[in-house]
């Protein structure tokens, strides 16, 4: 079996996180001394290699949530994203190496039934993220199998322009590619772990979080809206998303059959979610509102006005007011929230599709709701996952400074 080449003596970026260039060369020297080591090539030679055509539609290292052109909620349907299969991931791994015999495609090793089950093992969003990370690694000049020396260079050269979380996610994808191919995982090397610790110490690990759309601001947004068909749809999205603490993907995946009207309000069935890829399902109660803004009335009013009796609950509306048959996308929810927040006179910076979920959890904590009850609504797996919202909500409740100043 032909071994993948290793990039030789690529310059190490100047960084306090990396050992000296000499220590980086020790890796290369040790690999050259090993007669079983793969052939060594220069970074220029690696960059000059032709890229297979199926690499051209990857992310190329760009963030997944960026758009090439301005988008509106109704131009973003659920089919807007390129879907990647497990075969794509297998061929992606081969493409990085440019030697498919070193990393055979999954379907060449499995029966049809086993290959079908393998395809179902990875969620489409996870497949897109993994493929995008491998695209970026290959565009940088990375090869598989990678070495610890190559990974340390990769970390250093991306440490200035990317957040710690982004680098860690990409390393997780590279590690998964090695594990899937049965190759030694360079990301588990102690030198790589040490450099990641240094990266976290130098840059910190605080992640940018979505601005929560709190209850009072939500009411301001709702009060600024009219009664058009689009207004009714957006009102239903905002109120249902807030009351259920739903992720945007959970909202747009809802079908009419997933909503059951009962005396107490609505029972919403979430058939799959980010933390429930196996489809165990979850039922959430949406009670009648006690204020002028009721999520139950908003959803029922939207379905009646739109004449939707089956299929997707939330759909695009054309600029002429015609209702589409397709499903609204998660990106559309993010755009919708920012537009509605801005229309209410609130700075939209930081708001996203996660703002409804974050706003519900934080508002509930401010109202003194127990974490057990909040988790029952949002589906958070543990108090630890919910903690950041609770801390925000409890920040001024019983504040020690307030008692002494």
Image (cartoon, rainbow, N blue to C red):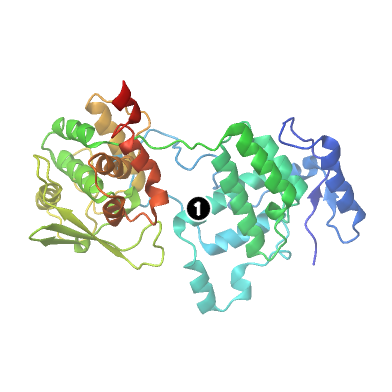
Front one among 162 and 213: 213
Residue 317: % across, % down:
22, 44
- Please state if 56 lies on the left or on the right of 75 as rendered: right
When the figure is inspected, residue 284 is found, relative to residue 321, above or below; the finding is below
When the figure is inspected, residue 230 is found, relative to residue 39, above or below; the finding is above
Residue 100: % across, % down:
70, 62
Q: Residue drawn 72% across and 31% down? A: 16
Q: Residue drawn 32% across and 39% down? A: 355
- Please state if 22 lies on the left or on the right of 399 as rendered: right
Residue 371: % across, % down:
31, 50
Q: Looking at the image, which residue sits at the far top?
A: 405
Can you tell which quarter of the image residue 144 is in?
bottom right
Can you tell which quarter of the image residue 21 is in?
top right
Residue on which disc 1 sits: 128
When the figure is inspected, residue 97 is found, relative to residue 233, above or below; the finding is below
- Mark 1 element type: helix
Q: Can residue 321 be seen in this view?
A: no
Q: Looking at the image, which residue sits at the far front?
A: 404
Front one among 145 and 57: 145
- Please state if 193 lies on the left or on the right of 299 as rendered: right
Quarter occupied by the C terminus: top left
Quarter occupied by the N terminus: bottom right
Q: Residue drawn 40% across and 58% down? A: 275
Front one among 297 and 98: 297
Can you tell which quarter of the image residue 35 is in?
bottom right
Front one among 211 and 28: 211
Q: Can residue 4 be seen in this view?
A: yes
Q: How many labels does the image show?
A: 1
């Amino acid at each position: 079996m032909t071994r993948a080449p290793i990039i030789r003596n690529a310059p190490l970026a100047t960084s306090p996180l990396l050992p000296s260039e000499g220590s980086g060369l020790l890796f290369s020297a040790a690999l050259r001394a090993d007669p079983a080591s793969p052939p060594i090539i220069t970074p220029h030679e690696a960059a000059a290699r032709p890229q297979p055509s199926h690499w051209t539609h990857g992310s190329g290292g760009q963030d997944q949530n960026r758009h090439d052109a301005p988008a509106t909620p109704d131009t973003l349907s659920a089919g807007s994203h390129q879907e990647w299969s497990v075969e794509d991931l297998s061929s992606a791994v081969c493409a990085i190496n440019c030697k498919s015999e070193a990393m055979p495609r999954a379907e060449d090793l499995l029966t049809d039934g086993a290959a079908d089950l393998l395809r179902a093992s990875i969620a489409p969003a996870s497949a897109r993220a993994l493929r995008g990370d491998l695209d970026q690694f290959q565009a940088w000049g990375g090869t598989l199998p990678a070495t610890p020396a190559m990974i340390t260079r990769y970390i250093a050269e991306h440490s200035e322009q990317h957040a710690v979380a982004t680098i860690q996610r990409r390393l997780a994808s590279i590690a998964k590619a090695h594990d899937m191919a049965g190759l030694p995982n360079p990301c588990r090397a102690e030198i790589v772990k040490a450099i990641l610790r240094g990266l976290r110490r130098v840059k910190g690990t605080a992640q940018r979080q979505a601005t929560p759309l709190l209850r009072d601001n939500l009411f301001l947004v709702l009060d600024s809206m009219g009664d058009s068909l689009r207004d009714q749809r957006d009102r239903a999205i905002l109120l249902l998303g807030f009351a259920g603490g739903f992720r945007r993907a959970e909202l747009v995946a809802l079908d009419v059959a997933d909503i059951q009207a009962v005396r107490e309000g609505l029972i919403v069935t979430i058939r799959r979610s980010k933390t429930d890829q196996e489809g165990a399902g979850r039922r959430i109660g949406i009670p009648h509102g006690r204020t002028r803004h009721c999520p139950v009335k908003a959803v029922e009013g939207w379905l009646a006005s739109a004449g939707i009796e089956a299929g997707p609950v939330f759909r695009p509306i054309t600029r002429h007011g015609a209702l589409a048959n397709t499903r609204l996308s998660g990106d559309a929810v993010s755009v919708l929230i920012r537009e509605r927040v801005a229309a209410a006179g609130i700075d939209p910076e930081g708001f996203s599709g996660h703002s409804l979920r974050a706003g519900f959890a934080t508002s509930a904590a401010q109202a003194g709701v127990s974490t057990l009850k909040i988790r029952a609504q949002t589906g958070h797996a543990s108090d630890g996952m919910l903690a950041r919202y609770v801390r925000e909500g409890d920040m001024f409740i019983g504040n020690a400074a307030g008692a002494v100043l």
